[in-house]
Image (cartoon, coloured by chain):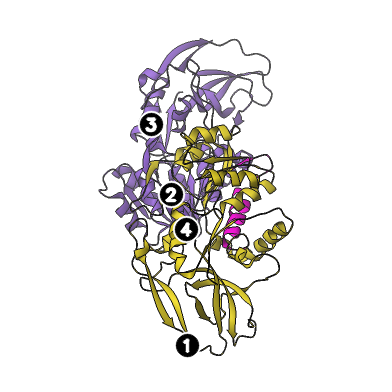
Chain colours: A yellow, B purple
Amino acid sequence: MKTKVIRLASRPQGLPTAAQFQFDTLDLPATGAGQVLLKTRYVSVDPYMRGRMNEGKSYVPPFEVGAPLAGGVVAEVIESQHEALPVGSVVVGNLPWQEYILSDGKGLNRIPTDKAPVSYFLGLLGMPGLTAYFGLLDICQPKAGETVVVSGAAGAVGLIVGQLAKIQGARVIGTAGSDEKVAYLRQLGFDEAINYKTTPDIAQALAAAAPAGVDCYFDNVGGAITDAVYDLLNKHARIALCGQISSYNDTETPVGPRPETKLLKTSARLQGFIVGDYFSRWPEGVQQLTEWYSQGKLQTEETITEGFDQIPAAFLGLFKGDNTGKAIVKVS
Amino acid sequence: MKTKVIRLASRPQGLPTAAQFQFDTLDLPATGAGQVLLKTRYVSVDPYMRGRMNEGKSYVPPFEVGAPLAGGVVAEVIESQHEALPVGSVVVGNLPWQEYILSDGKGLNRIPTDKAPVSYFLGLLGMPGLTAYFGLLDICQPKAGETVVVSGAAGAVGLIVGQLAKIQGARVIGTAGSDEKVAYLRQLGFDEAINYKTTPDIAQALAAAAPAGVDCYFDNVGGAITDAVYDLLNKHARIALCGQISSYNDTETPVGPRPETKLLKTSARLQGFIVGDYFSRWPEGVQQLTEWYSQGKLQTEETITEGFDQIPAAFLGLFKGDNTGKAIVKVS
């Protein structure tokens, strides 16, 4: 059995390009005892993957040059010698970018096909949803009436953060990079949404949107937006540091106003995190998100690109802000 | 009754000078019902007072131009019409910079005279000791075998932080600004002490002193030392943000490498705090510090300047690193 595979051709300097992705063909052996053959249905592309393309330790080990790229994948079992995963099962797991995958089943989670579109297990009901859930509810802990700011609010994580904050009764302000995204955020129930690309003075716009100051900040972006939010923090503010997409492609450490004095003056808490820190509580998170989704309290949005060969383009689009909500590639 | 008083003459731009301090004489009325007349014995000078000289909200309200400066003072009751504070009582409180003070007793704490030198209630057993206690034990929570870095380690707070970390069984690294201070830190039991003024490469020196990385950072200083520590953080590092003396006299927001990505990669927690955040737990802190002191587990050091008129000079000396341990002015 042959499958297409996408390998990391070389480590990017700055913004990745198509040159970083090497398409290849792989021979898969016959499905053996205890194994399943998977047909890939949806591939997730996520900003954190950019970090794995660099050398050096980070919160996840780097991709190896020449090895397949990998990430969240929803796939269907098309051959099985694995008791718990019969043919027709749909699974989600951290899997290589291949059209077909041979697996021993370890690390695969079987997902229901009747609760939600299966691609949602790469978004709302998967890693991004859990990131929003734990980052907001465990780190930020917004209370009713408090003000929450979310940067990258129209991204896969951000749009869930904002809705979760509304469920908690908070006032929610989101930043995003297009008027369409801003309109979508308002439709989702965000109290204020700011197009940071067209707003002449983001600090002034945030201050106007948050007259009572900022109690919680869920940061996906970093840079100038974050600088402005730090100036608006209330006493005992909580900051969940989830992503810094504005600097992922920087080749040198970005420089900016030092935040420490602002955090000191407000007795603020800033917590870096990855969803893996909450691994033991994932079932709780999935259950709660599924419940709110089925009650109509959570909506989501996907930007779906079609075709295995378009995975690199979909990934590169993340850094141009192409996606509203979860960026997904539909493979089959 | 007449008393000398020191008022804030004007708000400093950058480093304060003698011009900011206006000596004056004040007439005190006779001690009335419920009041005590205090004779000042020791005045505390502390870096945080610099922040109070600026306009604008911070964690404590600003000093008013023309009003007396104020802070931690140990004083003796020399006239009393207050039942709980008979003549001869020694008290500590947040009081104006005056040789004599009329008080209604509110906010004064009577201190024992047989447990420790009374000036220690401005240091080891007072605000700086409690700052070290809660910042290290509540925020950093060092475990035996972990590595703790303290900046400004020979200051009033830092030298207690280091000793508390040793009591917890941690490896302790301190930074300070003179060879004498470094020698003192080693004598106190610090595992490593670095003179940041003479070390050519502070990042390299810290990396060499912390081969297993940094689990806890207690920051009194900010700037280049902090940048270097951020590069050494272990997964789930805890940072207590206590002071930023390197930038207190800056007239513009200092600029430096953005720390967010480093904090994100390590799931680090950074908590700004002031000792007032722990007000309800002060008795616990004083009791524990007193116990460790009486058991010989905690030592302290004071830099004592003599004479009421020398208060401004002692305060200004803080920003030149004149003091080892607590800077105190002995008034009478």
Q: Which residue is mark 3?
A: B252
Q: Residue under mark 4: which chain is it in?
A: A
- From the top left corner, tell me how far across and down residue B309 is, in percent: 40, 19
Q: How far apart are the two marked residues, 4 and 2, measured between alpha carbons? A: 10 Å
Q: Amino acid at mark 4?
A: Pro
**Residue toward you, A102 or B228:** A102
Q: Nearer the viewer, residue B211 or A317?
A: A317
Q: Earlier in the sequence, mark 4 or mark 2?
A: 4
Give me the C-alpha separation between circle 2 and circle 3.
Answer: 24 Å
Q: Amino acid at mark 2?
A: Ser
Check if residue A126 falls in the magenta segment: yes
Q: Residue beneath label 1, please?
A: A29
For marks 2 and 3, give the one nearer the viewer.
2
Q: Secondary structure at mark 1?
A: loop
Q: Where does label 4 land, which residue?
A: A47
Q: Say which element carries label 2.
A: helix
Rounded to the nearest angstrom, the CA distance separating label 3 from label 1 is 64 Å
Mark 4 or 1, which is nearer the eye?
Answer: 1
Label 4 Cα crowd, 10 Å radius (few <14 / some 14-19 / many 20+)? some
Region of the chain picked out in magenta, as a range: A125-148
